[in-house]
Image: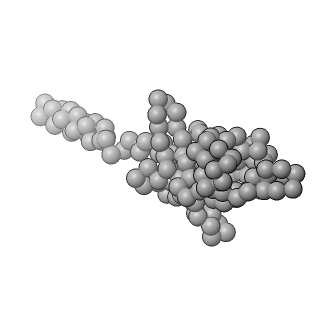
């Protein structure tokens, strides 16, 4: 009878060890998951006379533009873009080698580079898009603008 009690105790001990497997722990959330808010634009390819190339610019002040990107753990996202008209765009994302790739449901794609410096997390657009700035009441100039978001 003692042998059965010892065998039962041994069996219970082993089942307790098996139940504590590290494989059951949930995977840590990707650093990219969360809400990203448009923080600034970095100007390039504008005429040198404007002296703004490389400068961080407030896009809300310049063109009343704002944007948030909500990145969810189920690999979906929603982007809310505001510039006179408000629009919501959605799609799926993947994150590899510090690059966030957004695939919009309308077929467009955007890529952002993730960085973290002193607990400040940013994603910056890989390929700057064309951007038009007014330089007077009758003239505009076109250059490139890289969008930078912060978490």
Q: What is the quadrant of residue 59 in the picture?
A: top right
Can residue 129 be seen by looking at this rendering? Answer: yes
User: Is 69 situated above or below 92?
Assistant: above
Q: Nearer the viewer, residue 63 or 112?
A: 63
The residue positioned 47% from the left and 37% from the top of the image is 116
Position of residue 26 measured from the top left corner of the image (x, y, whole percent): 42, 43
Of all residues, the one furthest to the front in this rendering is 49
Q: Nearer the viewer, residue 92 or 9?
A: 92
Q: In the picture, which quadrant includes the C terminus?
A: top right
Count the marks. Answer: 0
The residue shown at (49%, 57%) is: 94
In the rendered structure, the answer to whether residue 114 lies left or right of residue 148 reads left
* Residue 11 location, quadrant: top left
Along the line of sight, the residue nearer the viewer: 139 or 10: 139
Name which quarter of the figure residue 12 lies in.
top left
Can the viewer see residue 8 in this picture?
no
Q: Is residue 119 above or below residue 19?
A: above
Residue sitting farthest toward the right: 137
- Residue at 46%, 34% in the rendered image: 117
x, y percentage for residue 147? Answer: 62, 49
Where does the image place residue 127, in percent across and percent down from the top left? Answer: 55, 58
Where, quadrant-wise, is the N terminus in this rendering?
A: top left
**Above or below for 60 versus 131:** above
- Percent from the top left, x then y, of residue 109? 58, 64
How are the colours assigned in the image? one colour
Q: Is residue 147 left or right of residue 14?
A: right
Q: Nearer the viewer, residue 40 or 103?
A: 40
Residue 16 shown left or right of residue 145 in the figure: left
Residue at 79% x, 46% y: name it: 64
Residue found at the very far left of the displayed protein: 3
């Amino acid at each position: 009878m003692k042998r059965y009690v010892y065998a039962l105790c041994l069996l219970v001990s082993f089942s307790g060890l098996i139940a504590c497997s590290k494989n059951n722990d949930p995977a840590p959330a990707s650093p990219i998951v969360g809400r990203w808010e448009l923080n600034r634009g970095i100007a390039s390819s504008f005429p040198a006379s404007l002296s703004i190339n490389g400068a961080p610019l407030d896009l809300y002040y310049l063109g009343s533009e704002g944007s948030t990107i909500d990145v969810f753990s189920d690999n979906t996202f929603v982007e809310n873009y505001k510039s006179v008209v408000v629009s919501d765009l959605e799609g799926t994302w993947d994150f590899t080698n510090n690059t966030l790739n957004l695939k919009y449901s309308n077929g467009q794609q955007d890529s952002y580079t993730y960085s973290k410096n002193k607990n400040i997390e940013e994603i910056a657009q890989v390929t700057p898009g064309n951007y038009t700035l007014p330089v007077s009441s009758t003239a505009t100039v076109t250059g490139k603008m890289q969008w930078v978001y912060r978490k």
